Image: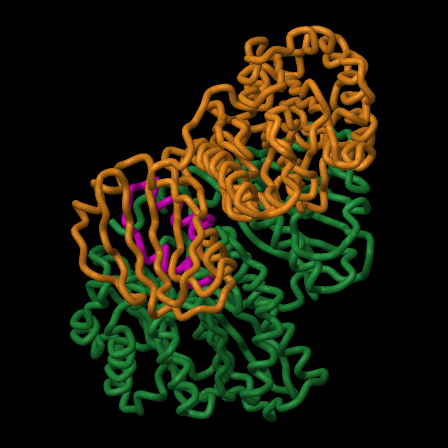
Chain colours: A green, B orange
Amino acid sequence: MYHSTENPPFATLPGGVCAAKGFRANGLNCGLNKDKNKNDLGLVVSDVMCNAAAVYTTNKVKGAPLLVTKAHLAACNGKTRGFIANSKNANTCNADGVEKAERMCSLAANALGVDPNEIVVASTGVIGQILPIEPIETHIAELVAGLSRDGNQKAEYAIMTTDTVMKECAVEFILGGKVCRMGGMAKGSGMIHPNMATTLNFITTDAAVSTELLQKALSDVVRVTYNCLSVDGDTSTNDCVLLMANGLAGNDELTATGEDYNVFRDALYFVMMNLTRMLAKDGEGASKLLECTCSGAPDLDTAITVAKSVIRSPLVKCAFFGEDANWGRILCAIGYAEAEFDIDRVDVDLSSSNGSIAVCRGGAGIGFSEDEAARILAADEIFILINLHQGNCSATAWGCDLTYDYVRINGDYRT
Amino acid sequence: MYHSTENPPFATLPGGVCAAKGFRANGLNCGLNKDKNKNDLGLVVSDVMCNAAAVYTTNKVKGAPLLVTKAHLAACNGKTRGFIANSKNANTCNADGVEKAERMCSLAANALGVDPNEIVVASTGVIGQILPIEPIETHIAELVAGLSRDGNQKAEYAIMTTDTVMKECAVEFILGGKVCRMGGMAKGSGMIHPNMATTLNFITTDAAVSTELLQKALSDVVRVTYNCLSVDGDTSTNDCVLLMANGLAGNDELTATGEDYNVFRDALYFVMMNLTRMLAKDGEGASKLLECTCSGAPDLDTAITVAKSVIRSPLVKCAFFGEDANWGRILCAIGYAEAEFDIDRVDVDLSSSNGSIAVCRGGAGIGFSEDEAARILAADEIFILINLHQGNCSATAWGCDLTYDYVRINGDYRT
């Protein structure tokens, strides 16, 4: 697969979730967030029904919106028209959660003139506080009336919580001679340690792809993108990735793997990998993106497990915040990764736009210049390169440093 | 088992590892630590050979001292006379690690006039820096000459790193009509997420117990004490618990389970549980001890898994630092615990010396007074009480809050 240090295999486009044909979006402040300048309610709809694929959190506590989304997709045979989403309140662990999530769908559906099952829903914010429905009821007409082909950033702004930057990515590719587009948006930025998905990610495409193949592509790509992301090791209750394909590009529907499927999957990987990097770089309180690649692994699972173990370690994260080349902590985190391999063959290098340095060979330290290491670690994107030297598989995991700001943000989140 | 909120089942004694008959200890600064007032080298020996039991880290990266300790215990059929230990340098991931660890044992053994295999060794500190042996060589005679019956705190001070308080505990109990004593010491305080053991814990007793039974008691008790401790989720390379029994109390050697074994195991649990609490409360940067008890579990593994999942969550830890009753994060961490149970029956209460409050019933939030919650959370020892209501097993896990100081300490540890 493409690695972020290589030249991009796709040209990127503006437009996010509206880049593909037939998708419109809007977002506004309905009053869930007391800051009137911060959008808290968003809507994205397709002009025609879409084949859909979704992955959800594995947390036993599942947000009510996920339950309703699952039920609606099933009721429509895996198809959907669009989704409504809010921030500030996760609508989770509340006795009336499902009722409120259903109500959000029916409000949007009524205003759009479609069946409530054709709309799905997502929420993010504080867990365990009753969702006030009135602000949504009173703003739904305005939300629908304002849907437009360039509303993607309004919708994106509506799902952001402690995120400090918008996260969008869109690309163009060719299937069966037709130009297709795909775009996505995502929000972070704490409680991020996805297992099957991460919190609120939406990807739209005008490519025609069967529901089964969409789900296969999404599951395969999630495994090596969102599921390799960790900000703090906490797996959220509301994680969800939704992929919608409306077929308006006019290509013959993809129904089987092959060359065209590979193009589609590579485009999906490119979009989701870029969103994953954005989520990591904008992790709560983060000052640096950490990207850890484990190569030379006997199998993909081992590569993923090792890379994630390093990215998750609080001690590794603090060391990079301090720009300290404390490679012993990296080796320690490799050592407790739950996988079988020989630790005595492991090499570790640190790299950034400022250069590259070897810090460990064959599981033992080697002399290196602390000055050179400090210069490399001063960059804001750090690459941790691990070679196990016992196979041909590799995987990358994404995270960020652990800073004073993470503690500040999360010591006082509800207020 | 005894819970820390109940009246102690044993009277505690001073003396730490020297409380039991026949144990002498010493500690001094040999120069590994540039602060001349901080001990960095310690020695604890028994007047006669001891039956020993040990558990080690499950990290694939194993400190060289652990390898040497394992080999020496095997060479002496599970017996040992004592141990030498240093802080500031973990002697791990170095090409000459085993050679240096062997040298530490032989230096101590020669000065004591015993066989090098009769001495075991432990090190803690920075990983991957060559251990200078000269400071130990030049101070070994002084270290041995200063061994005394009241040197326990000198030895304890020698193994401390970022610990801010000494951690000792000793008790008295009766076996076969004979008064026996047991005492332990421990050091923390970061890279603490033990799996089989935690970093540098030593327990001495004058009870006579067979090697096999010692190992059984240690393994059983480690599972519900040290292995239920997490400061930061990082499993160290040098974790080790060593339990030495020299038999000088004069009881008939315990060789089988039964009533006397239960007394011994309860005493061991009491000592190790107290050391575990001390390690948690003095976790790097900690301002509060967090003690999470999961009851009503279908089996012990489920209770342990749930309690540890909550204690480990960075978001839960930050919330308690902020004295914020953000119970949704507790339920989220229960939800991603890797165990099978019904989340919809879970109750959660928060408690401290300032009172107790219910925050969640049947997996959903219930109204509570934020003022009362704030008063409860202002205490420096917080109890998180979870009842799954689906069985009779319970377990406790110990941890601490996540603070600015953890980030500060670990952003700049090596310098």
In the image, residue B414 above or below residue A349: above
**Where in the figure is residue A397, as x and y percent of width and height?**
61, 56
Would residue A107 be found to the left or right of residue B405 on screen?
A: left
Query: Is the stretch drawn in magenta largely helix, strand or loop?
Result: helix
Q: Residue at x 72, y 46 (%)?
A: B60
Q: Residue B144: percent from the left, percent from the top?
A: 70, 10
Vertical placement of residue A48 versus B77, above or below: below
Horizontal side, residue A231 vs residue B148: left or right: left
Q: Residue at x 69, y 63 (%)?
A: A301
Q: Is residue B329 magenta?
A: yes
Q: Position of residue B137 (x, y in %)?
A: 77, 12
In the rendered structure, does residue A407 fall within the stretch colored magenta?
no
Q: Which contiguous range is marked in magenta?
A: B310-336
**Residue A149 place in picture, x, y as percent:** 38, 76
Residue A376 seen in render: no
Residue at x-position 49% and y-position 78%: A54
